[in-house]
Image (spheres, rainbow, N blue to C red):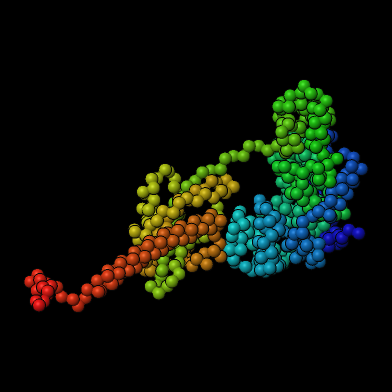
Amino acid sequence: MRKRSPAVRAGKRAAPQNTPAGQAKKKAELRLGGAESARPSSYHFFNEPAEVSLFRSRLLRWYDQSKRDLPWRTVAMTETDANIRTYAVWVSEVMLQQTQVATVIDYYNKWMKRWPTVQELAAASVEDVNEMWAGLGYYSRGRRLHQGAQKVMSELAGEMPRTTQGLLKWLPGVGRYTAGAVGSIALGLVTGAVDGNVTRVLCRLRAIGADCTSSLVTDLLWEICNLIVDPERPGQFNQALMELGALVCRPKSPLCARCPVQTHCHAYRKVILIQETDAKSPLSNPDSVQSPCVPDIEDCSAGDSSCKLCLSEGWARDLGVQNYPRKPVRKAPRVERMVTCVLRCRMTEDEDEPQYLLIQRPSTGLLAGMWELPSILLEEDIPGKKHRALLSAEVQRIVGTSPDEDSFQYLGEVVHIFSHIHQTYVVYSASVGGSTERDREPQSRWVSASALQEAAVSTGVKKIMKLYYESTSKLQGTENKKQKRSAEARRSQRTKRTRNREDRAPCRGLKQSSLSQFFTSSKPAST
């Protein structure tokens, strides 16, 4: 017998029409002139109740046998406290935004160990949250979790929202998908949850070839998902669709042969039809974009000229099911260059471990509240010879003294890609003496190497420090080799001098005779 989650056992389910997806359906119908015009062709929907029922059973059977063992799924299935369950699923869904599951697992476990309840997260400091989130990327997510926890405590008496509308209203950064996922998985609400994986799966299942980011397609995908979600197991059904997209219906190299709902997939059917037609037509051109024997819109009664959901471009043979979904060309990221300094200082002469300077970023914008190394944005193509002057002035402003000129060392460049910025860091290292004004800049601090690794710094800073340590190690290795060669040369000189003295040792104590003494001593005795 299938095990149901506490949320489903509690029987708390919302009617589909009252969910955000249901409301989106009504808006789409109004925008397009009614329910009939909202459906360009029945080919792109699930129309038969029998097919929907079969689809649900096949997908959930596969999920029960093949799903990954993930910590947040365990909490959703075993935790009886709805408040903890909702909090735990909320944390996981926020962490999983734009981040791979393998990366999230360790962060999630550490987070839940430190802040197992919304009350404990609300009591944490922003600095602690930033440090815990460091390296996970998209840092505003961690701050929004913290803000949401504080809002739950201050305005909801510590009780997590129990409806999708409440999740949308009270939790910062929660949108339609997150509300649907948390509501269905943690609370058993009958609502869909359309993320990137689900978008890809549904577009292939129903051969939706229009721009999947458009409001038309987005709203209709929510309508489909809301229609087919299993009312008895809504959370597990939504997770099954996501799991199918992650493990089988992948963006590239999809595993169609392993798909449990292959017979429901219009994209797969079209691939098979084209292959069969090509096999019967030896004269067909395999390099052509479209098959001459198969309609561009297979079984779509509207035809490609009027259907707003069909492929607007030709079918690419080499892509197969990957013809779906279609996305607009992504805007190229902005290119930026920054000159950065790893500034070290020994506060006392007896201090073995150097300290490194960190600067806190503003509380809003990119990497808000995070710590970084002294850096300057290069707004124009400034020659490298001016980089040191720029960094010297910046360090002077922050700590009240300039770096030692001889200590400047160019280390190289580090590239880090944000979602919308292609960032290149031009990296230098330098040193200052121990007489810095430590409190001159309130948003700065000196930290040890170990403390820096634990601080709320971005992945870009960690890349820079890795370059610094590698460069320092190479320089130290070069210096050690020079010292070794110098020591060997000194030993060789000492050995040579010792041997020369030893070679002269047998002659010591002997006096040189004069020439007359030599002949006298050499004359034979008379007889």
Left or right, 341 with respect to 297, comes to: left
Is residue 310 left or right of 411 when viewed as pictured?
A: right
Give me the residue at 76% from left, 53% from top.
181
Residue 320 in sight: yes
Instruction: Pinpoint residue 309: horizontal percent, then vertical percent.
Output: 76, 34
248 or 203, nearer to the observer = 248
Residue 433 image-quadrant placement: bottom left
Q: Quadrant of residue 76?
A: bottom right
Q: Residue at x 66, y 51 (%)?
A: 98
Residue 323 spot, x, y in % from top left: 73, 35
- Identify whether 199 is placed above or below 443: above
In depth, the one of 261 and 258 nearer the eye is 258
Residue at x-position 62% and y-position 39%: 330
Q: How many marks?
A: 0
Q: Which quadrant is home to the C terminus?
A: bottom left
Q: Is residue 227 visible?
A: no
The spot of residue 63 in percent (x, y) is 82, 52
Toward the front, the furthest residue is 527
Which of 284/149 is in front?
A: 284
Residues 112 and 491: in front is 491
Residue lying at the far left of the rendered structure: 516
**Residue 431 location (% of width, % of height):** 39, 62
| Image quadrant containing the N terminus | bottom right
What residue appears at the point 51 percent right and 58 percent down from the top-left corner? 466
Q: Answer with the quarter of the image where residue 139 lies.
A: bottom right
Tell me: residue 97, above or below residue 31.
below
